[in-house]
Amino acid sequence: MKVAIIMGSNSDWPVLEVAEKTLVNFGVEVEVVVASAHRTPDLVHEFAAGARDRGVEVIIAAAGAAAHLGGVIAAYTTVPVIGIPINATVLNGMDALLSFVQMPSGIPVATMAINGAKNAALFAVQILSTKYPELVEKLAADRVKMQAEVKAKGEKLAALRQGK
Ligand code: RP5
């Protein structure tokens, strides 16, 4: 089970750390790469064209500004690409969101929310779960854990409102 996380700059990493952590928690091997579609196009080509041969089954691509990284990678491989628009400019991520989500017909990039790194990792695990049944159980257990956490939050708020 292998996912690659590629980002346009190391300045994107603070947003993406949670994606790696989430994938590792599910037992997924993670490859982390910095490469820019406009500053290092050859590196991006090499990364994307060789991804399937390196055993990469899902690619998470993250970038800010006029973020063409996801689309460029998707153009070079049929490995599914999940995009994370990064909030990196005065437009607060709207520039990256539109660049990722408005892919022209034919080359899809499954775009998450702005800075949506956790959901990108969970979606990657869901894709992998169609091939690896053990991930189906882990995903179900993760949702049970989340339900308990939300319940605890409700109880905490109720206690606060009652002045306890
Ligand atoms: C994008 O430009 C990167 O993905 C990053 O979000 C943004 C700024 O990059 P740096 O100037 O920090 O390298 O390509």
Image: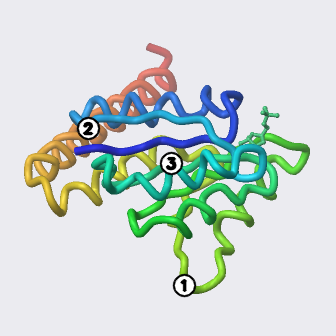
Distance CA(mark 3)–CA(mark 1): 21 Å
Q: Residue at x 54, y 84 (%)?
A: 106
Look at mark 1 in the image and give the residue it sits on. 106
With 9 as the anchor, is 134 left or right in this view? left
Question: Which is in the foreground here, disc 2 or disc 3?
Answer: 3
Specify the quadrant that holds the N terminus: top left
Foreground residue, 71 or 95? Answer: 71
Q: Between residue 72 and residue 119, name the one nearer to us.
A: 72
Q: Secondary structure at mark 1?
A: loop
Please say if 100 is above or below 36: below
The quadrant where residue 98 appears: bottom right
The residue depicted at 42 percent of the width and 32 percent of the height is 20
Q: Specify the farthest residue to the top.
A: 164
Query: In screen coordinates, is 145 left or right of 110?
Result: left
Identity of the residue drawn at 39% across and 28% down = 21
Mark 1 CB within 8 Å of ligand 1? no
Task: Name the one closer to the observer, 158 or 50.
Answer: 50
Tag 3: residue type?
Phe
Which of pointers 1 and 2 lies earlier in the amino acid sequence? 2
Please identify the residue farthest to the right as the structure is shown.
Answer: 90
Give the Cα distance between marks 1 and 2: 29 Å
User: The residue tagged with tag 2: helix, strand or loop?
Assistant: loop
Q: Amino acid at mark 1?
A: Gly
Which residue, given by chain and number where applicable, does mark 3 sit on?
47
